[in-house]
Amino acid sequence: MLSEVEKSELNNLLREDDEACERLKLLATVSEGLSEYSYHPQNNETKPSLKYVPWLISLAATIVAVLSFLKPEAIPDSPEPVVSTSQTPFYALLVDQAGAEFADGAGPDQVKFNKGLYQLDDGVIHLRFSNGVDTVMRAPASFAIKNDYNIRLDHGDVWAIVPAGAEGFTVSSPSIDYEDRGTEFAISVDGVNGSSTLHVIDGQVDARNPKSNELLSSVFEGESTEFSEGELIPVETPDLTKFPSPNSIGYLRWQEQHSFYTNQSDELIGYFPFFEEPQLKNYASNPVAGNGEIHGARWVTGRWPGKKALLFDRDDDYVEFNITHEFDELSMSTWINIDRFDQPLSCIIVSNDWDVQGDFFWHTNRHGKIWMGYYGGHRFNKSNTQNIPSGQWVHLAGSVSIPQKRVRLYMNGEGIGYADLEPSSFNKMVPGMCRMGNWGTSNINEPIKERALRGKIDQFLIWQKELSQEEVEELVELGKPSVLWAMSSQ
Amino acid sequence: MSDELNADPRAAFPRLWAKHDPGIRAFVRASLPDPHDLAEVMQNVSVIAWKKFSDLEDAETGFGPWVSVIARYEILKFRRSKARDRLVLDEDVAEKLLDEPSDSFSMRSEWLLCLSICLKKLKKDHQSLLQEAYASDMSIKKLAEQRKRKPNAVYQTLSRLRSVLADCIEKEMSMKGAQ
C-alpha cells in the first residue's frame, strides 16, 4: 500500500501535471486491457478471458508502476526508448557486465546509455558516465538516466564511485535525493515502499528533499541512513556484500563460464582455468593433457581481481605437462599479457628438447609475431600480419591441421597468420612432455634462458581439432576482460 | 435504429456492454485503483445502465460515452461513501481525472485496440509472463517460484512491461494520427 507521503506526492503530481494524469489513464487502460484479455501466443491473437480476472495482479505493483512513471521529471523522459543510432549522444557507457538482461525496450543502445528509463532484469552492469562517475548495479533494478549528473533509482542497489570534479552527482530515490560531495557510496531502494538506505564508504553525501532541495542531512564516511515513511534515521551498516563492485563483474562472468568449458565435447583435451592450486590442473572432461607441474612461476592477479594468473618473469619459470597422444589436428588458445619480448624467441608452449618428429611449438619472436607448428611439418607461403602488443591482455589462438595442410593464427578473434603445411616424413603431432612459458632442453648448446616468456597467462585451452574462426571469436567473447576492452581491441 | 433494437429495446445491451466493458473499466480504474472498489462501482454502473438503457436514443454510437457519464456519477457517489483515508486520490484529483472531453471514451477504445498490437511486439517470454500473471489464478509468489525469480523482480518486470506497452500505445496512436 502507499504510505501517506506517497499518496500526497501522487495527488500533488496529478493535481499539477496534466500529462501525468494522461499517463495514469493510459496505464490504467493497459492494466485493464491485460486483465480483460488473456493473450494467446500460439494463435497470435487476443480473446476475452473465460474467467474473471484478476486485475489484482497486485495493487502494490500498480502503485509502483504509477509512482515509477508518473514522477514529474519522468514524464518527458518516459515515452521514447533509447534511440539506436551510432551518432546518438550518450551519458554513460556499459563498461562491463555479467549476464545482463534488460526488459523489452528498456535496455541500452548496445553499450550506450542515453537519457531514458532502464530495467535490468538479470545480471550485473558497470556504467561509466561521461564525467567519470562509475556505477555498478545488480538485477533486479529499475532506473532512469536524466543526465550525466543525475540518475533516478526506482528499485535496486547501486554502488557509485565519484571522482574529483564530478561532485554533485545525484542518485534520486522516490522520496529523497542523495547528492554526492566527492565520494564513494552505496544506495539501496525498495521499489515497493519507496524506502531507501544509504551507506557512505568514503567522503560525504548530502540527503536532500527532492522538491525544495532542502538539506536534510549530511552523511559521512562509515555512516548509514535509512529514509522510510518520511523520516531519515541513522542505521547500522547494511549488508554491503549485495552491492557488486566494479572489479567484481569480470570475475563473476568468468565464474559463470567454468561450466561452459567443463561441459565441452571430448575434443577439448586441455582446460586450464588457472585456479590457484599446487598444480596447474586440467579441468577438461577429456583430460588427455596431464596436470601441469609449476616451476618458479608465481600466482598473480589475472584479467580481473580474484582471477589468478601465473607470472613468468625469470629464466627458470615454467609449467611442465605431458600431452602423450598423437594428433592429426591440434588447436590451442590462451589469454596472455606479455610484459616484454626479451629473447629472439619466447615460448608459449613447446615440446621439450625439440629432437623428435611430431614435437610441437607455439612461440613469439622478438617483434611479437606468433607462430605454431610441429617438427616434420614444413610451413611455407607464410603470412603474419600483426604483432602482439605488450602490456595488455590479448587472446591468442592457433591451429595446425595436417589433413587440411594449414596453420592458422588468431589474435583477439581476428585471423592474423596463415601458412600452408607440407607434411614430410612424419604426419602426426606428438607434443609429449612440454613446457609452458619456457623451453626445456638437455642440449647444452641451447641454453634454457633464451626462450623464457616474460608475462602472465591466466587461461590455456587445447583441442584435438582445428578451431573455426567462429569458435575462436566465441572464446574471445566469453573471456574478454571488459566491454571496453572489446571495443578498443577492434 | 437497428432491427435488434426495434425488436426489444434492451436486446442490444449485453452485446454493447461486452463491447465497451474494458473501456468503462479503464475509465473507472484510473480514479479507483483498488480492485474491490472497481468491482463494486462496475456492478452499480451496470445495474443503472441496464435500468436506463431504454432511455438511450442512439445506443450504437452513444453507449460508451453514456455509460461513462453514469460511471462518473457512481464513482463520485462511491467515494463520498468511503472514509477518506481509504481512498488513494483526493476529491479534487479524482474529479480532475473524471472530467474528460467527450471523445475520451473512443480514445480509450483506440488504446485498447493498440494494446493487442503492442502485445504482439513483446518477447515471447514476456508475453507468456503477462498471460500467466493476468490470465491465471496463480499468485505472483507462485509465478516467481515457477520462474526461479524473486517476487519483487516479477513485480518489477510486470510494472516495466505495462510501461513499455503504454509507450508502444502512444507510438501507435501518434502513427495513426500521422496517417
Image (tube, grey):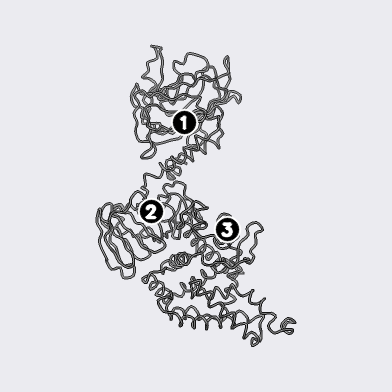
Label pair 3/1, CB-CB below 8 angstroms: no
Farthest-out residue, top: A444
- Badge 1 marks a residue whose secondary structure is loop
Residue A107, can we see it?
A: yes
Instruction: Using residue A312 as the reference point, say whether residue B78 is left or right of it.
Output: right
Instruction: Using residue B118 as the reference point, say whether residue A348 is left or right of it.
Output: left
Neighbourhood count class around disc 3 (C-alpha, 10 Å): few under 14, some 14–19, many 20 upward? some
Q: Mark on residue B122?
A: none
**Picture quadrant of residue A407:** top right
Indicate the amino acid at tag 2. Answer: Phe
Neighbourhood count class around disc 1 (C-alpha, 10 Å): few under 14, some 14–19, many 20 upward? many
Farthest-out residue, bottom: B55
Q: Is residue A73 shown above or below A347?
A: below
Q: In whole angstroms, how far apart are the C-alphas of marks 2 and 3?
A: 33 Å
Neighbourhood count class around disc 2 (C-alpha, 10 Å): few under 14, some 14–19, many 20 upward? many
Q: Nearer the viewer, mark 2 or mark 3?
A: 3
Q: Earlier in the sequence, mark 1 or mark 2?
A: 2
Residue A255 placed where, x, y %? 43, 40
- Badge 2 marks a residue whose secondary structure is strand
Q: Are marks 2 and 3 on the same chain?
A: no
**Residue with the mark numbered 3:** B127
**Residue with the mark numbered 2:** A129
**Residue with the mark numbered 1:** A283
Chain holding disc 1: A
Q: Residue at x 46, y 35 (%)?
A: A395
- Badge 3 marks a residue whose secondary structure is helix
